[in-house]
Image (cartoon, helix red, strand yellow):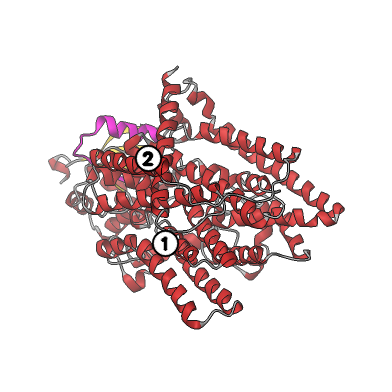
Amino acid sequence: MTGSGFHILINLSWLSVLFLTALGLGRTVLTVSGIRFRSYGEESLFSSGIGFGVLSYSVFLLGVCDGLYPISIWLLLIISLLISAGSLIFSPPSSERSELKRSPGRPVDYLMLLLLGVLILAGICLIQTPAIGNDTLSYHLAVPKRFLQYHGFHFIPGNIFSHYPLGTEMLYIIGLVMGDDRTAKGIHAIFALLTLFGIGQLMKNSIFRDTGNGSAFPVMLFFTIPSVFITAHMAYSDLSYTLYTFLAVYAFLNWYDGKNDRWIAFCGVFSGLGVATKYAGLLVPFMAILGILIVCRYDRIDNRQTLKLLLFYLVLTIIIGSPFYIRNWVVTGNPLYPFFYKIFGGIGWDIDQSRRYDLFHRGLGMGREWVDYLMLPWNLSFHAKMNSPRFDGLLGPIFIWVLPFGLFMRRIKPEVKIMVAYCAITSIFWAASVQQVRYLIPAMPFLSILAAYTVVDFGRIKSVQILLIASVVAGTLLNGYHIADYLNRIRPIQFIMGSETREAFYNRHIPSYGMYRHINTHLSTGSKTLLIYMKNFGYLSDRLYYSDSIFESHMLEKILSAAGTPKAVYSSLAEQKFTHILYDIRYVFGNRSTFSERNKSMFALFQKQYLKLLRSDQKRYYLYEIQLPPAKLE
């Protein structure tokens, strides 16, 4: 076995151990809940979600106590594994014997499962390649790496994302200790696979439980969405958030179906985990509260019982979701840092950055006029692009082709109406906030189920059903083209087979990688580099650095604007103990620069007198050492 093959085997083994640990921890918690699941699959799904939440908050507690050392992480894993093993071996399942109707598999079902198998195999190849996602290198892995260096939670100047809800990043700390960035990517892929499994379970146990057909259909639809497939194999937090919100809605549907109040507890638990993963999760409690009120009124549940359910739900959501917000409040003075700056303020941020950050978010999409909102479904389906302000992702046309037919269905199950309401509210909130395709992924499992439900319902009108199936096939082929194009650009096989080194892989995908490597190998451990428009790829740097989030020249431009002489610029940088400056010349002196002409001139004078060129690359990246000039220039 080659060294690369051995690493893949080890990585997959660690991921399997981590999954089983989460599964067993969740089973341990569920044994005290007293709830009966409809199937062993459903029980395993909810157990896994709870188990990962337990692991996440266990690491969080270590971080609060400044206990983030490799030895403490390994000790946590060993204890968790022992608890899990006891639960998996000795605890009986909490699920009922399945009596759901099952129809024989159809050829089309096997074809869809084969497609899923191919995509999953391709995904396994992708997670074995080094992490290259922009947000991964600047945030999702850079922050856990820094926390491990600090051995706990500390304010990271310049990186506002280090104070977002970090539920998934706590798991990435485990991944970095167990392996490396590829292990962290694998953790996110596990959440994607659990979401696929969850879609199938919901279809079997609820939507199509009368027939047992159709489970593979929405799973295939969801995983062939290009942004879903691509994001699933990056160390992001979108699929972990998607799983938690999916399970919150799933629990709500089970409560609606059987009125077992314990399901409201699960809804609260997963709502809280969603809140602890992304700020967008704060929308989920509002939808859940509205849903509880509507269902209680419709079923004529008395006010006292309704209030009890609401308090039960809210207490669990707040207890589980609030720790990261409390941490933000203590560290930065703003529980929603860096948002709502005018209300809460927050260290390391100012009103100008807050204003520009809001404008940046509103710049994503294809406009915010009323006509743009009318055209939004069309533009999102046909004009979205990866790595572009035009939604920064790919959705594909399947939903816009299929879902409108749902308006003409004869009878819609109440569970499906709840999904429609969830998707509608989520989509409206998305359209009014940050129009980035990744942020819409939490609605896509249910959109996929709704699309499958629509196609199956029109079995009564064969001509329409054939048209819908043709639309799905055409959309899937188009999505497949985008997925294949992505795989061709990444080319994971040549890395896995050893024909491409890690360094060569990085050089092919990240033009600035050579500069970060030079910093790691040639600068002293006491150095501190100011990064100017280097995309904040802090995960690649083993040395101390500073870079402003989003607007990467903000601090330097403030220094230049306030300085009357180059010496004043030097004094400001020396006061903050900077030893080097690394920048992309296109954003400093080039046509992409945000510097005023006065600040350009000041920086040019400072560079001439106080900077010594150490390395340049591609006539684009320049690394300088900050040093005192000869006396005659003082």
Q: Which residue is mark 1?
A: 272
Give the quadrant of residue 379.
bottom right
Q: Is residue 105 left or right of residue 284?
A: right
Towards the viewer: 237 or 354:
237
Towards the viewer: 391 or 77:
77
Q: How much space separates mark 1 and mark 2, taking CA atoms? A: 26 Å
User: Residue 421: percent from the left, percent from the top?
Assistant: 61, 67
Q: Earlier in the sequence, mark 1 or mark 2?
A: 2
Residue at 70% in and 53% down: 452
Q: Is residue 83 left or right of residue 117?
A: left
Foreground mark, 1 or 2, reads: 2
Is 513 colored magenta in this rendering? Answer: yes
Q: Which residues are magenta?
A: 512-536
| Amino acid beneath label 2 | Ala
| Amino acid beneath label 1 | Gly
When the figure is inspected, residue 84 is found, relative to residue 14, above or below; the finding is: below
When the figure is inspected, residue 202 is found, relative to residue 13, above or below; the finding is: below
Residue at 26% in and 40% down: 75
Residue at 71% in and 37% down: 111
Q: Which mark is residue 85?
A: 2
User: Which SS class for mark 2?
Assistant: helix
Towards the viewer: 57 or 504:
57
Is 9 colored magenta in this rendering? Answer: no
User: Which SS class for mark 1?
Assistant: helix
Q: Which mark is residue 73?
A: none
User: Residue 217: percent from the left, percent from the top?
Assistant: 68, 47
User: Residue 148: percent from the left, percent from the top?
Assistant: 27, 43
